[in-house]
Amino acid sequence: MIALFVIGLLLFGFAVVVVGRAVMLPRQRMVANVTGIEQYGFSAAGVPEDAKSRAALADLAKYVGEAVGGRLGVFRESELRQSLVSAGMYSVSARMLFGYQVIGAVGLGAVWLSLSIIAGTRATFIVIGTILAVVIGWVAPVAYVRRRAQKRLDQIDYALPELIDLLVVSVEAGLGFAGSLRVATERLPGPLGAELRLANHEQRMGLPVTDALENMLARCPTDTMRGFVRAVVEGQRLGISIGQIMRNLAVEMRKRRRQLAEERAHKAPIKMLFPLVFMIFPALFIVLLGPAVFSIFDALKNK
């Protein structure tokens, strides 16, 4: 018990030291930046407290990720980077995500261990709970990023037919494909609009349209986006009419959206099976069969 208490104190002390370092580091940088700005005659506006806390946590994750990940190595760094890009988290690197994992594992494990020792829990439950807390703290950041990436990719796939409709109207009105893409970018909100704005920015920097679309496919590797990009790239290379290609793509993608909706509708009965069997049916049986069972017991007692 004493050994567990000492381990908990060490973990808690480590967490406090790292958090304190992360809190002080952005303040020092901010003071240096404000001092440099004021030398040129500008006044700095106040920074919101939530922004300061997020910046402190991000600096902490970056510091821990570089320190620990640089020595131990980050597993599946390319896969983590792809998940972050798909989730739209461009300011977070794979090392920073690794730092969030380390912070989550150490912090959650230290909190659970300290609370368990204070509550006087048995040593077996303390060890098992600490292991579970460490695993949850380690897995939670990656699970959050992947869930956000999947949700964002689904939103992009859902909005892609509207993009194609806008491209068809713009191309048939006489605009080129690059100009039609810029017009569609101004009309489309959400994740797809953000990806298109990034692709347009790459074009303004001198990248060809096909290369910008290939980069967008690398950021959003879905089947629908792959079909759109491949069709546009092949049409540009072979000189085929973009308007006809877009019309065919719009029909195909709407069919795919309809099939996806039907697939989700067919999965609904299976998803409803668990709450029906374990939540609704037991209560229904108690309400319907309960009086009959009590009546049978009363009849047997009277006999």
Image (spheres, rainbow, N blue to C red):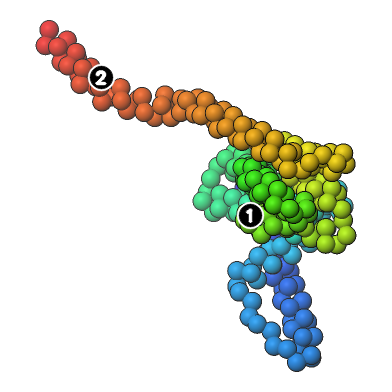
> What is the number of callouts on the image?
2
- Seen in the image, is 216 located left or right of residue 142? right
The residue sitting at the top extreme is 303
- Residue 188: mark: 1
The answer to whether 5 appears left or right of 180 in the picture is left
- For the point 73% across and 39% down, which residue is it? 244
Q: Quadrant of residue 53?
A: bottom right
Residue in the foreground of this view, choosing between 273 and 116: 273
Is any part of residue 173 visible from this angle? yes
Q: Could you tell me which quadrant the C terminus lies in?
A: top left
Q: Is residue 189 above or below residue 301?
A: below
Relative placement, left or right, of 63 versus 156 is right
Q: Sort mark 2 into few (<14), some (14-19) or many (20+) by Cα contacts within 10 Å.
A: few
- Viewer-closest of 40 and 289: 40
* Amino acid type, mark 2: Leu
Q: Is residue 289 above or below residue 224?
A: above
- The residue pinned by badge 2 equals 289
